[in-house]
Each structure stands twice: as structure tokens, then as C-alpha cells.
């Protein structure tokens, strides 16, 4: 004969388990680690226009889609994009986005154009915690300085390349151990550094 299952609230030993109180909260599901992707705009042209209105050069229009394909193929698709409103950064994002097959939230932030690394950090600290992959599209030197500020001091090859040069269309990927609000210097691990290039014949 099969033994009866213990009644609710009673253990097999016969001890009564305490009923959860009215204010009890179920354990929260684990949150995926946050990831920051830092993209410098693709190569821009130099027509006689204000700096903010400079468009992408022909090479930039080839490289920006290649950056999008790299993000897609490496599973680095963002759910929030913080982009400088300058024409060359907007065009970089639009061409990259066309390769992603996704529709993330996009914020065009003036500070991402005129701010330095400290201002970029403040923008990132305001990111909603529900957004686990944030893409920042900006300008050098600020994007390079921000990446150097955030990444842990390591001697691996990607870290050395970031210190040496941050070319147009370059992408740095950093893993964050904590929240966006707590992001600070030397708090992130640089996991990838890539410089996608488009096919000149394409």
C-alpha cells in the first residue's frame, strides 16, 4: 500500500512547518549579468559643415553594417541604445541596426556628443536595471577613455589593444558584476574588442 503524502504544512517527521506570513515574498528570479557595448562611430567625411553635421564617409557606410553583423553574430544585441545625436553616430547606429533583426529602445543623448568619460559614466548609471545589454554609440576620445576607466587592469591582448588605439567602428564589450547605478572605475571585465570592417567591393 502506498503511503499517504504528508498534509500541507506537515513534514514527513510530523513537525508542522510554519505557514508563510501575509508579507512573505517569493524568491526573485536571478537577474542576468549586465553587459556594456561601446561602439565608436564609423569613419566620417570632412565636408564644410559643422562638426555635429558630418556624415559618414564611404568606408564608414561599409563598416557600420559590419559592426551590426558582428553584434548579431556574437550575440551582443542591445536592449537599450544610448547614442550621440551627431549625424555620424546616428548614421552608424542606423546602418548597424539594420543588421540586427531587433528593435531596442534608443535614446539620443546630447551628453554622448559633448561629454567626456565622466559624463558618459553618469548616463550609464541612469540605465534601467531591466536593460541588461546597453550599447553606447559615441566618439573618441571619450569612448576610449570610458572603456579604459571601467575595465579592470589586465595584461591580456584585448586590453592592450584598447590602450593602444580605438579605431572607427571599434567595439568594446564589458561585463559588469553589479548594477548600472553602482558602475565605477575598474569595475568591469573587458571580454571582447573588435574592429569590424566591411567589404570594399560590397
Image (cartoon, helix red, strand yellow):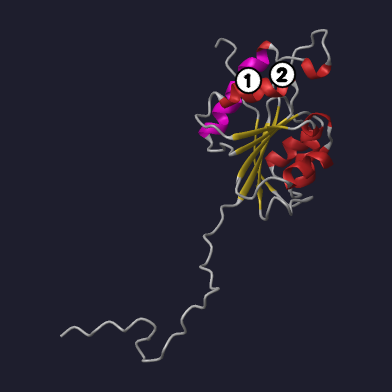
Residue 67 pos. (x, y %)? 60, 26
Seen at 66% across and 11% down, the residue is: 58
Dominant secondary structure (helix, strand or loop) of the stretch shown in magenta: helix
The residue sitting at 83% across, 14% down in the picture is: 50
Farthest residue to the bottom: give it. 14
Magenta segment boundaries in residue numbering: 59-73
State the residue lying farthest toward the top.
Answer: 48
Q: Quadrant of residue 87?
A: top right
Depth check: give the residue in front, 116 or 60: 116
The reply to whether the magenta stretch includes residue 63 is yes
Q: Is residue 108 left or right of residue 72?
A: right
Nearest the viewer among 1 and 172 is 1
Q: Quadrant of the N terminus?
A: bottom left
Of callouts 1 and 2, the N-terminal one: 2
Residue shown at the point (55%, 23%) measured from the top left: 98
- Furthest-front residue in view? 22
The answer to whether 158 is drawn above or below residue 67 in the figure is below
Q: Is residue 57 left or right of residue 202?
A: right
- For the C terminus, the quadrant is top right
**Residue 28 percent coordinates (x, y):** 54, 63
In the rendered image of this protein, does residue 169 appear above or below residue 75?
A: above
Q: Please, what secondary structure does the residue beneath circle 1 have?
A: helix
Residue 169: x and y in percent read 68, 26
The residue under the point 31% across, 84% down is: 6
Residue corresponding to mark 1: 63
- Report whether 6 appears left or right of 37: left
For residue 43, the mark is 2
Q: Is residue 3 above or below residue 78?
A: below
Q: Position of residue 40 (x, y in %)?
A: 72, 29
Which element is circle 2 on? loop
CA–CA distance in space, label 1 to label 2:
8 Å
Amino acid at each position: 500500500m502506498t503511503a499517504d503524502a504528508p498534509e500541507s504544512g506537515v513534514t514527513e517527521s510530523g513537525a508542522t512547518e510554519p505557514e508563510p506570513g501575509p508579507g512573505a515574498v517569493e524568491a526573485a528570479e536571478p537577474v542576468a549579468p549586465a553587459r556594456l557595448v561601446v561602439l565608436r562611430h564609423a569613419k566620417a567625411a570632412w565636408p564644410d559643415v559643422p562638426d555635429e553635421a558630418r556624415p559618414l564617409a564611404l568606408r564608414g557606410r561599409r563598416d557600420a553594417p559590419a559592426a551590426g553583423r558582428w553584434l548579431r553574430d556574437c550575440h551582443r544585441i542591445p536592449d537599450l541604445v544610448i547614442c550621440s545625436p551627431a549625424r555620424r553616430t546616428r548614421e552608424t547606429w542606423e546602418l548597424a541596426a539594420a543588421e540586427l533583426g531587433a528593435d531596442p529602445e534608443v535614446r539620443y543623448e546630447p551628453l554622448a556628443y559633448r561629454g567626456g568619460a565622466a559624463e558618459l559614466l553618469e548616463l550609464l548609471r541612469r540605465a534601467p536595471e531591466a536593460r541588461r545589454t546597453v550599447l553606447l554609440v559615441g566618439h573618441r576620445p571619450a569612448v576610449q577613455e570610458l572603456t579604459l576607466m571601467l575595465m579592470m587592469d589586465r595584461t591580456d591582448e584585448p586590453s592592450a589593444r584598447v590602450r593602444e588605439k580605438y579605431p572607427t567602428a571599434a567595439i568594446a564589450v564589458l561585463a559588469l558584476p553589479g548594477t548600472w547605478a553602482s558602475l565605477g572605475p575598474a569595475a568591469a571585465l573587458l571580454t571582447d574588442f573588435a574592429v569590424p570592417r566591411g567589404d570594399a567591393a560590397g
